[in-house]
Amino acid sequence: MDMNSMINQELINLAIVCVTGFVGWVTKEIAGYLSKKGMVAQLESHKDLVKVVVNGVEQVYSQLHGKEKLNMAKIELIKLADARGIKLDGGTLDMLIESAVKEMNNAVQVEIANVEASEPPQSK
């Protein structure tokens, strides 16, 4: 074998290694993207489920306050999630419920501000 054919063979081997590494990297990136997209969709699904539970607890258990209402929301959400085969840990459960309550409270504040803005000024 002459020197040129040995160099060509090494360049071909190097190219194969580079292409294999690049394909592996692309595969990893695509898998990560799809996993992230799936997690986002799953989180959105959980968020919708939590909104239903929080609104339901707010309506049905209006006589409860604070921790009692939070515990009731957790119980109801766990029941609903289990029925759908969704596993939620305690930290995720708290975070999702708090987020839904905050969104609900913000919506109420916006609605109150809209009503107050549309009322005519009262004369004295």
Image: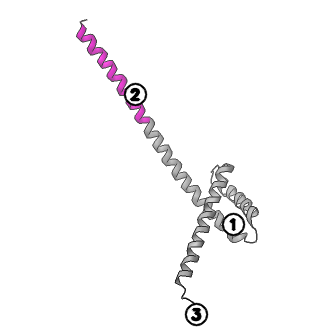
- Rendering quarter of residue 122: bottom right
Q: Amino acid at mark 2?
A: Gly
Determine if the magenta segment contains residue 13: yes
Q: Secondary structure at mark 3?
A: loop
Disc 2 and disc 1 in contact, CB within 8 angstroms: no
Residue under label 2, please give it: 21
Give the number of the disc on residue 57: 1
Question: In the figure, 50 relative to 36: above or below?
Answer: below
- Label 2 to label 1: alpha-carbon separation: 53 Å
Pinpoint residue 61: horizontal percent, then vertical percent.
73, 69
* Residue at 23% from the left image edge and 11% from the top image edge: 4
- Rendering quarter of residue 30: top left
Q: Amino acid at mark 3?
A: Ser
Decide whether the magenta segment is chiefly helix, strand or loop.
Answer: helix
Dot 1 alpha-carbon crowd within 10 angstroms: few under 14, some 14 to 19, many 20 or more = some
Q: Nearer the viewer, residue 56 or 118?
A: 118
Disc on the earlier residue, 3 or 2: 2
* Residue at 56% from the left image edge and 53% from the top image edge: 43
Disc on the earlier residue, 3 or 1: 1
Span colored in magenta: 1-27
Furthest-front residue in view? 124
In the picture, measured across the screen, residue 111 lies left or right of residue 23, that is right
Residue under label 3, please give it: 123
Q: Nearer the viewer, residue 66 or 46?
A: 66
